Amino acid sequence: MAELAKPSAGSAGGTAGRGWFRLMLGLIVRRVLLMLATAIAISALLFFAVTQLLGSPAAMMLGQDASPQAIAALNLKYGFDRPAIVQYLHWLTGALTGDLGRSYTTQQSVAAAIATRIPVTLELSLWSIALAVIAAVVSNTIPTGRRVLQPVVTAANLIGITVPNFMLGVSLIFILSVKLDLLPSTGWVPWSDGVGAHLEHMIMPVLTLSAYYFGAFSIVYRAEYQNVLRRPFVRVAQAKGLGEWRVAFRHAAPNAILPVITFVGISMGQLAGGAVVTETIFSMPGTGRLFVASIESRDFPVMLAIGMLIVVGVVIMNLLADIAYAVVNPQIRHDL
Amino acid sequence: MRRPGLCFGAGVVACIAVIAAAAPLVAPRDPYASGIDMLVPSSALHLLGTDDLGRDVLSRVIYGARASLAIGFGAALAAMVIGVPIGLVAGALRGRVDTVLAALIDLFIALPGLVLALIITVMVGANLRNLVLVLGFVMWPPIARLVRGQAMALREMLFVEAARATGGTPLWIIRRHIWPGVLPIVAAQFATSVAFAIFTSASLSFLGLGIPPPTPDWGGMVRAGYDYLAINPWMSLAPGAAVSLTVMGFYVMGRSFR
C-alpha cells in the first residue's frame, strides 16, 4: 500500500519548487477571497431574510396587542427603524470584532452564550463521529464470516440512515432509562461534577448521533472499499499469500478511507447545527439546542449568530477540501 | 425473489398508501375525539392506548400517514421541479452557465438541510403548503447534481453529437435526446427524495415546526408522547416506528431501482 501511495506523492514532489509553490499560493489566495465573498454574501442574505422578511421584529417580539408607542420605543432601542443596509453593516462590523449583540430574551452577550455551549456540542460530535468512523470502517472491512456478518451490517447501515434521530433517542431512553433504569434519561453534567457522571450522561446522546453518521459513512466507505478490492495491488497482496485480515485492514482499507475523511470534514463544518435533534431530545446545553430555543422565542441575534457559525464552518471546510484536493491531485490544480 | 429490496420497499409503501387512503375505514376511532380516559396504556378498547388528551393513539398514527405522504410526495415533486431543469441545463450546456450553476449546487449541497429548513419554516410559518415548498427548496441540490452528471455523460454520446451536427438547438437536444436518458435516474431518485422529505419533515415537527395540532402528525406525536414514556410508551414509540418504517420503505425502493 505504501508503495502504491508513492506515485501521486512523487508527482507532487516532482513539480515542487518555486513554480509549484507560487501556483499553490495563488490558488489558495484566490480560494480564500472567494470564500470571504461567499461568506459575506450568505451572511447578508441571512440577515435580510431574518430581519426583513419576518416583518417588524419589534411587533413580533411584543405580540399583537403591542401599542404603537411600545413598538416605536423598541425600534429606537434596537435600531430597527434604520435602513436594512445600515443595520447589516452595523451587525457585520460588530461580528468581525467578536460582538454579536445581546440576546433579546436573556439580555446576555450572544458571543458569551455561544462560547459556553460550543464545548458541549464539540464533545458530543467528536465522540459520535469517531465512534461512527471506527464502526463504519471496521464493520465493512472484516473479511471472515462475511456471509453471516453481511446481513447484520447491511441492516445496521439501513437503520442508521432511515431511522430518524429522535426515534433512536426516544427508544434508547425507553429501554435504558425507563425499563432497565441503567442510565439517566436526559440532562448534561460538566466534567467538574465527576467524570463518571459526565460520561454516563454522554452515552445515549453519542449512540444516537453516531448512528446517523454511521449510516452515512458506511455508504461512502463501502462503495469505495468494493472498488479498491478489485484493484491489482489487492490481487498482488493476496497472491503473495498474505492473510485475509492483513489484506483487508493493512492493504485495502487505508486506500478506501479518503472519501470517509472528506465526509468527516463536511460533517465537522456542519457541526454547530448537526446535533440539533440529539441535543433537543437529551436536553443538552449545546449550540443546536440554543438555536432551536432562539427560533422558538424569535431571538434574532442568537439565530443569526448560530446561523453564521454554521455557514462559516461549511465554507471553511469546503475551502480546506478544495485545497487538499489540489495538493494531492495535480490535474485539479489547473482547473481552479 | 430476485429483488428482495424492491419487494420489501414497494410492499411497505403500498401498505402505507392503502392505510392512508382508507384511514376512515381502518382507524378504530375518531383521531380528533378526546375522552376522559387519558394516557391509558394498551387495552382492548385502545390497542395502543390513549394520549394526554384521551385520543386513541392507533387512530392518530393511522391518520398521520396522510400528512406524511402528502408532504413526502409534494416536497419530492417540488425538489424535482427545481433540481431537474437546473441539472439538465448545467450538464447539457458547457461554459459559464455550467460553472455558475455547478458552484451554486456545490454551495447549497454543503448547507445542512435541516437547519436551513428550520430557518425558512420559522420565517414563512408551518403549514402543509409551506412545508412542501421549504423542503423542496432544501432538497433540490442533490437532484440537480445527479441530473447534471448524467446529462454531461450523455452530451458526449455520438447521437447527441449527431443531433448537434444536424443543427439541433440546445433546448431541442435537451428535450429530445438528453431528457429521455436522464428520466430513469430521476424516477429512482424520486422515491429516495420522498424518504428524505418524510425524514426531515418529521424531524422538523419533532422540533416543534410541523403541521400545527390537532392534525395527527408523526413527528409531533413523538415529541408530545416523549414526556409520558413511563406511562404510555406507545404514544411516542408507535408514531416513531411508523416514520421509520415509511422512510425505510421509500429508501429501499429507491435504492433497488438503481
Image (spheres, rainbow, N blue to C red):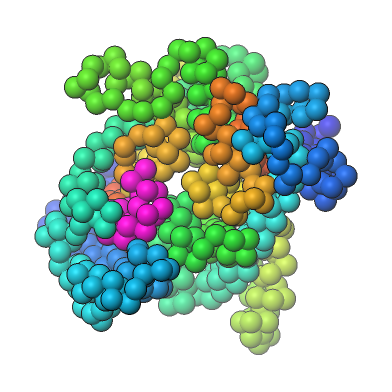
Q: Nearer the viewer, residue A50 or A79?
A: A79
Residue A210 visible within the image: no
Magenta-colored stretch includes residue B109: no
Q: Residue at x 14, y 56 (%)?
A: A98
Q: Residue at x 11, y 60 (%)?
A: A97
Q: Nearer the viewer, residue B257 or B64?
A: B64
Q: Residue at x 55, y 15 (%)?
A: A179
Judge whether A261 appears above or below B76 on screen. above
Horizontally, residue B19 falls left or right of residue A145, namely right
Q: Position of residue A61 (x, y in %)?
A: 35, 63
Judge whether A246 appears above or below A318 on screen. above
Q: Nearer the viewer, residue B181 or A106?
A: A106
Q: Residue at x 55, y 71 (%)?
A: B86
Residue B57 figure quarter? top right
Horizontally, residue A47 falls left or right of residue B45, namely left
Q: Position of residue A271 (x, y in %)?
A: 34, 44
Magenta-drawn segment: A289-312
Judge whether B164 appears above or below A7 on screen. below
Q: For the C terminus of chain A, which image quadrant?
A: bottom left
